[in-house]
Image (cartoon, rainbow, N blue to C red):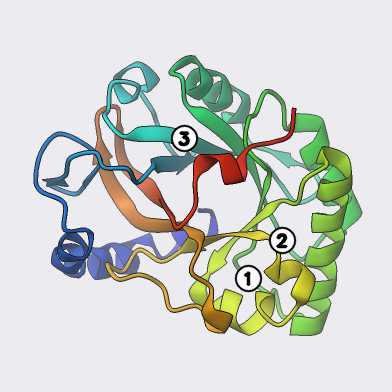
Amino acid sequence: MENRKSDRSERNVLAGIALLSLSLLLTISCGKGVGWGASTWKRTDTLYGIDVSHHNSINWNALGKEEGISFAYVKVTEGATFVDPMGSNHIRNASSQGMKVGAYHFFPTRSTPAAQWENFRKHNKGTDLIPVIDFETVGGLSYDEIRKRLKTLASLMEEGYGVKPMIYTSASLYNKVISADPYLRSLQLWVGHPYGTAPLLSRGRVSYVWQYSAIGQLSGAKGVDLNMLVNMDIEDLMLKK
C-alpha cells in the first residue's frame, strides 16, 4: 500500500527471488488467470483481488476480463484531510466490472483518530466490503499509544458501519502490536507479505487476506498489488446492508 512505495524496489527484488517458492506453495498448474510477473495460473476455489490507489493506472474494462479477480480494495483517504483523487473513480469502475469493492484509509500518527474517521466517513461511498485501516508505521509512538489510537478509530468505524473494520499491516507489526490486544486481534486481518511464503502470525492466526505480490501483471493492471483469501470467504468481508 502507501509506505511500501518508497521501498518498492527492494521488495520487488525479494518478491522476484521468491517467485518460484510461491508457485510451488500454491501448486496450481499454469494457465490463464491471476499472475505474478510472467507466471500465471488457473483459477481455483481461492478468491483473488487487487488493491489500488492513485499510484495505479488501471484499464478496468481489460481487468474485468481477467479470470479470477473477484474483489478490489481502493484507497479513499489518508489522515485527517487527504482524499485520494482517483478513489471514487476506482470504486465506480471496479463495481461496473462486477467486483466486490471496499475502501481503505491510510492511518498516519500525526492526526487524531476522530479527525481521520470524519475524513473517511465523508468519502467512503458505494462500497460492498468492510472498511480497512491501513496501518504501516508506529511513527515513533509507543505500542500502547498506537494500540489506543487504532482501537479508537476501529471503534468509530464499527459504530458507523455496524461491523468491525479490517486492519492491514505487516506480519511483524501484527505480531508486535495488534496481536497483544484482544479487540484489535478480533478484527479481520489483511497481511502485506509479498515474499513467496505465507506469513508467520502469532497466537495461531490462520485466517486472513494475504497480499502476496506487489508486482502483479494483469490485463489492464501492471505492477499491481495482488491478494488472496486464506481460510476465509468473501462473505466474511461483506458490509451489512
Rendering quarter of residue 35: top left
Rendering quarter of residue 27: bottom left
Residue 130 at what x, y percent from top left?
67, 42
Residue situated furthest left in the rendering: 30
Find numbered disc 3 in the image and state the secondary structure of the residue it sits on. Answer: strand
Which of the marked residues, 1 or 2, is nearer the chain's N terminus?
2
Q: Residues within 10 Å of mark 3 (few under 14, many from 20)?
A: many
Rendered residue at 26%/42% (across/down): 44
Rendered residue at 59%/46% (across/down): 236
Q: CA distance from mark 3 to mark 1?
A: 26 Å
Q: Give above or below for 48 relative to 106.
A: above
Residue 111 at what x, y percent from top left?
83, 59
The residue closer to the viewer here, 4 or 237, is 237
Find numbered disc 2 in the image and state the secondary structure of the residue it sits on. Answer: loop
Looking at the figure, which quarter contains the C terminus? Answer: top right
Q: How many marks?
A: 3
Three-letter residue code for mark 2? Pro
Which of the marked residues, 3 or 1, is nearer the chain's N terminus?
3
Q: Which residue is tagged 1? A: 137
Q: Give above or below for 217 relative to 65.
A: below
